[in-house]
Image (cartoon, helix red, strand yellow):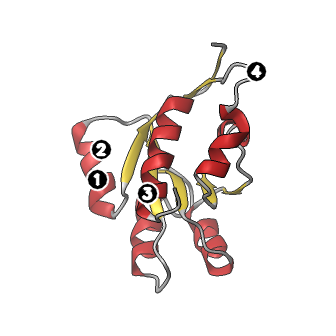
Amino acid sequence: MINTLYKDILVKEVPPGTNQELTFAVKYPLDILIAEDNFVNQKLIERVLQKLGYQTDTAADGMEVLDFLAKKRYNVILMDVRMPEMDGYEATVAIRKMNIIQPYIIAMTANVSTSDREDCFEAGMNDFIPKPISIGEVTSKLQIASACFNLK
C-alpha cells in the first residue's frame, strides 16, 4: 500500500485496480458531509471518500454544517471536533436538537484519550475516528452507519 502523510491525516490508499474503489459506495449508499476547517485535510478526506465512490459536500465549520443540513439530508457527518466559529461539539449538540432525520456523526480528531472520546459521545456523536485516518477505519465506520439506516 502507498502512504501519503500530510499534517494530521494519514491516507492509506487502496491499490489501483481493486474493486473496492468504486463498489463500496454502491454497496453502502450514503450521503456524506465532511466538517473540517483545514483545507488540506478537507482534500485528503474527500479523496479517500472519492476512492470509495462517494460524492461529498464539505463544510469548514459548525455553522456551515447547520446551513448544509437545512438544505439537504445527510446520513453521515464526518465531524472534526476543533473548528472555528462553532466547533464539532457545539455543532453536534445543535444537530441533535434539530427536527430532522438524525445523521450518524463520526468524530475525527487527533485527541484520542478516553476523556476526548467521552466528550464526543456526551455531545451526541455516534462514533469516533482517530487522526491520522485510514481507509480501513473509514470503511468500517461507514458500514456501521449504513446498517443504522438499513442501507446495506
Calculate the distance from the C-alpha at mark 2 to the C-alpha at mark 4.
35 Å
- Marks 4 and 3, Cα distance to the nearest angstrom? 28 Å
Q: Give residue 149's mark.
A: none
Q: CA distance from mark 3 to mark 2?
A: 25 Å
1 and 2 marks in contact (CB < 8 Å): yes
User: Which tag, 4 or 1, sits closer to the chain's start?
Assistant: 4
Q: CA distance from mark 4 to mark 1?
A: 38 Å
What residue type is disc 4 on? Pro
Of the image marks 4 and 3, the number of the one nearer the N terminus: 4
- Front-most of 126 and 150? 150
Q: How far is mark 1 from mark 2, CA to CA? A: 5 Å
Quarter-of-image position of residue 23:
top right
Identity of the amino acid at label 3? Answer: Ala
Q: Evaluate if marks 4 and 3 touch, with contact meaning CB atoms under 8 Å apart.
A: no
Q: Which residue is mark 1?
A: 119
Q: Secondary structure at mark 2?
A: helix
Residue that badge 2 annotates: 116
Q: Position of residue 98 (x, y in %)?
A: 46, 82
Q: Which mark is residue 147?
A: 3
Q: Residues within 10 Å of mark 4 (few under 14, many from 20)?
A: few
Residue 63 located left or right of residue 129: right
Query: Residue 149 vs residue 56: left or right?
Result: left
Label 4 secondary element: loop
The x, y position of residue 38, in whole percent, is: 65, 43
Residue type at mark 1: give it.
Asp
Frontmost of labels 2 and 4 is 4
Front disc: 3 or 2 = 3
Q: Which mark is residue 16?
A: 4
Q: Quadrant of residue 126?
A: bottom left
The extreme top residue here reads 1
Q: Is residue 105 left or right of residue 47?
A: left
Q: CA distance from mark 3 to mark 1?
A: 24 Å
